[in-house]
Image (cartoon, rainbow, N blue to C red):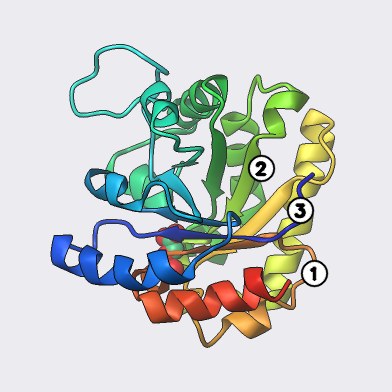
Amino acid sequence: METKKIVVGNLKTKMDINDISKYLKIINEQVIDKEVIICPTSIYIPYFLKQRYSVGLQNTFVNDEGTYTGEITPKQAVSMGIKYTIIGHSERRIHLDETDELINRKVISAINSNMRVILCVGETLEEKQLLKTDMVLRRQLVNALNGLSIDMLDNVTIAYEPVWAIGTNNVASNKEIARTANYIRMILHQNRGYENMRVIYGGSVNEQNIKELNQIENISGFLVGGASNDAKKFLKIIEEVVVNQ
Ligand code: PGA
């Protein structure tokens, strides 16, 4: 297992080209760690390539190659030097009706093309209130990773992203995150015989709460949405987690 912590910036769809140009002036100059994985909106990816940090996609297609209008295949991504893909983000589960079964096929296809997958799992507020968190996580993990060999699982990082924490400023507590990370590892161990899965946390991580969140011992990094769109805030997070490790 890789031991260095990672920070993934999920830029989503917030910036236009003017914002991107300003953003890159700071980021390309100052981000020099491969443990930082920036996932821009796909149309801007060429501007982020060949820098000192890593680049990822926010999604890849379910088949690794072929003709699928409007999609990006893992094979195409790899040919551009893109190593990472985020799969199963809750925004895609919710707005694009992505199912566990589809997510499973996307995970397999990405790994077959030699990509590394950041697989997002997490419960909604309603599920949390109904005390269904563990059940939901188990279902999402078991289904999304169905059929993966141990070698394939080596290419997966689980991002625990409670849906109620995304973009809300309601960050989960250190205790909740630590417990859930242990639970996720336990499921992987029980269900797949896989030890020490790398688990990162996402959901309202920002430059103010990162110091405290970074105290959690069994977390291998963070997936940052909103705050990664602000170059200065993102740099502070990177400094805390990656540079000072
Ligand atoms: P947030 O988003 O940091 O804005 O809460 C995280 C994510 O959606 O990955």
The disc placed on residue 183 is: 3
Quarter of image, res 16: bottom left
- Graded by Cα atoms within 10 Å as few (under 14), some (14 to 19) or many (20 or more), the crowding at tag 1 reads few
Split into 4 quadrants, where in the image is the N terminus? top right
Amino acid at pointer 3: Tyr
| Location of residue 51 in the rendering, given as x and y in whole percent from the top left corner | 44, 53
The residue at the point 72 percent across, 63 percent down is 219
**What residue is shown with label 2?**
138
Circle 2: residue type? Arg
Task: Choose between 121 and 46: the one closer to the eye.
Answer: 46
Mark 3 or mark 1, earlier in chain: 3
Residue type, label 1: Glu
Q: CA distance from mark 3 to mark 1?
A: 14 Å
Q: Which sits earlier in the primary sequence, circle 1 or circle 2?
A: 2
Side of 201 relative to 18 (left or right): right
| Callout 3 secondary element | helix
Q: Is label 3 or label 1 in front?
A: 1
Horizontal and vertical percent position of residue 212: 66, 84
**Residue at screen point 31% across, 11% down:** 66
Asked if ligand 1 lies within 8 A of label 3, the reply is no
Q: Which mark is residue 217?
A: 1
Crowding around mark 2 (Cα neighbors within 10 Å: few <14, some 14 to 19, many 20+) is some
The answer to whether the residues at label 1 and label 2 have Cβ atoms under 8 Å apart is no
Number of residues whose C-alpha sits closer than 10 Å to that of mark 3, classed few (under 14), some (14–19) or many (20 or more): some
